[in-house]
Image: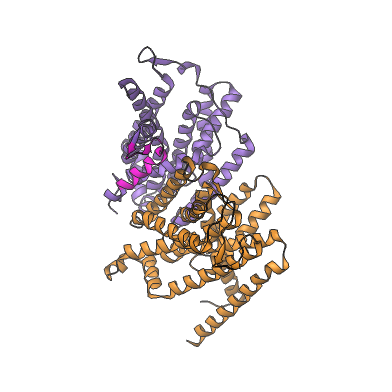
Chain colours: A orange, B purple
Amino acid sequence: MNATRNDAYTGIAVLATVVLALALVPLLAEKFYVQFFAKILIMGIFAMSLDLLLGYTGLVSFGHAAFYGTAGYALALVTPQYQAASFWTSFPLAIAASGLMALLIGFFVVRMHGIYFIMVTLAFAQMLFFLFYDTKIGGGNDGIYIDVRPVAKIGDWQPFNLDNFAHVYYLVLVLFVAVYLLLRVVLASPFGRVLAGIKANEHRMKSLGYATFRYKLVCFVLAGATAGVAGYLAAVQFGVVNPEMMGWHLSGAVMMMVILGGMGTLRGPILGAAVWMLLELWFQDLTKHWHLLMGGFIVLTSLLLPNGLLGLIAGLRRRAGGRHD
Amino acid sequence: MDFNTFLIQLLNGVQYGLLLFLVSSGLTLVFGIMGIINVAHGSFYMIGAYLAWSLAGVTGSFWTALPLAIVMSVLIGLLLEWLVVRWLYNRDLLYQVLCTYGLILVFEEVRSVLWGDDVRSLPVPELLNRSIPLTDTLSYPVYRLGISVVCLAVALGLYFVIQKTRLGMTIRAGASNRDMVQSLGINIQLVYRVVFAAGITLAAFAGMIAAPVSAVAPGMGNHVLIICFVVVVIGGLGSVKGALIASLLIGLVDTFGKVLHLEVGGLKLLPELSSMTVYVLMAVILLWRPEGLFGKKL
């Protein structure tokens, strides 16, 4: 009991230190790096949302980018041309759009298992991709530019200005911490325990009387809406949305981030996102054919590091300490 | 739509469907028998097309290029099974998906290094470069009919090998109980290697024969892969018969979705949303039969 309480205190201390360090970034770094850090945090939110499905509930979604893209498009579509949308309306609207999309797709997919789930999530995400790619709804394959970023005015008071890259960074950081804490609470709740039960043995949960379909659907919607937070922030930061935001390469990449860090822990996907983005930056610098390195890296990681970096660290620590637990 | 146009579209749909069957049968075989989900399956469709294009350029003849490309695909398959896939047999689906997803990136980039990023085209081979006249103004190319015939022949051959030969018996036994087959003294590892090579060669072969009628282009495998997933989901995983029926269904729905005009209450649905028809079909079938048309009950 005491040990867990100590662990909790250490956890809070680590979290506070990390957040504090991250808060200092805009004071110390140039614009490029601040935006790069923001991108890592955005991907961290996205990866955490997928981990809810992948690591905690055992639902291997290969179409998670669909919900990331939905929120981005929602912002682009409610932004009037040459004018700004309001942050206070467009943000909840975008999250709701992602959540609704997840409800719609989830209604079909969460009744599937294993390999079917993988293929069907990919297929539906791709359907959405083609909807935006082939039709004029969202500007076709060029996507939509968000010329004017959302304005966060309450009356005449403007708490932050999204044209300022540092303000965008802090908004991302605040939402990142909020998402982390929210997911922590959700996972520690009875609802989260049911999800863990579904991952371990869905049949048993069913025979215990849990309507697992509903639990999985709620989890899918929550993960979709959280991915929407990331998608909205990405649209704000980059000022453009395009079908690639829903493409399966992004779905594959985010899955990779979760595994790379270590799934079933919220810290893992965050670490995975950071390492992945840094690798991408480094590989792009090395060669024009950086996808080759990326692909090779994915193959090797999936074969050699099934528990991700956190699993590797834990294993090394055990070996060093000679503990056998 | 008059009868002749309908007939042409029907033939196109069947031809597209049969081609899909070649690719998806490989996917469903590898999963049904080895329990491996190969997301990179579509890449072999692309590799096949590029092999055919490049070898035809080197040898000067499509007909010499074809057997060479087939042999090379088999070799690539054997090598890949030995190098990567055999480590995935006892792994969770998640790692199989991830690992083979990594392979897609590798294959796309190798393609870019070897053959560049331009869209290529391969002329229809001389021997089959003619058309059958349907009316005074309409005709149908013989090569497309040829594709359908070849695909049907492969389907029959596949059925024969799996159901009627000793190898097929071993494969089916290996699918239902790997350890038992192994302890009966059969080298199941070798059987798996052969099945994997055969599976990806089916996809590569589809790419080869499709090359003269479609553009040989980067990323051409990705679209095919996803449609194959739809085929396999509709047909039922591991069922070759299901793959055949679902492929034909998708081929026809996709083809007619592009030429029919449909408006509901002033809202133009077809052909504007034609790229979504197959997914809608999938959604409907999933509601009705979650395990697919010929799949085992979940």
Which of A151 and A166 lies nearest the eye of the viewer? A151
Quarter of image, res B268: top left
Of all residues, the one furthest to the front in this rendering is: A156
Q: Residue at x 40, y 42 (%)?
A: B276
Which residue is situated farthest in the bottom direction here?
A2
Q: Height in image: B258 above or below A32?
A: above
Relative height, residue A315 to residue A76 (above, below): below
Report the residue at 45% width, 33% height from top.
B206
- The residue closer to the viewer here, A245 or A111, is A245
- Residue found at x 70% / y 60%: A31
Bounds of the magenta span?
Answer: B263-285
Rendering coords of residue B5 (x, y %): 35, 22
Q: Nearest the camera: B237 or A222?
A: A222
Question: Is residue A95 visible in this depiction of the protein?
Answer: yes
Instruction: Tell me: A40 left or right of A27.
Output: left
Q: Give the residue at the far top of this rendering.
A: B136
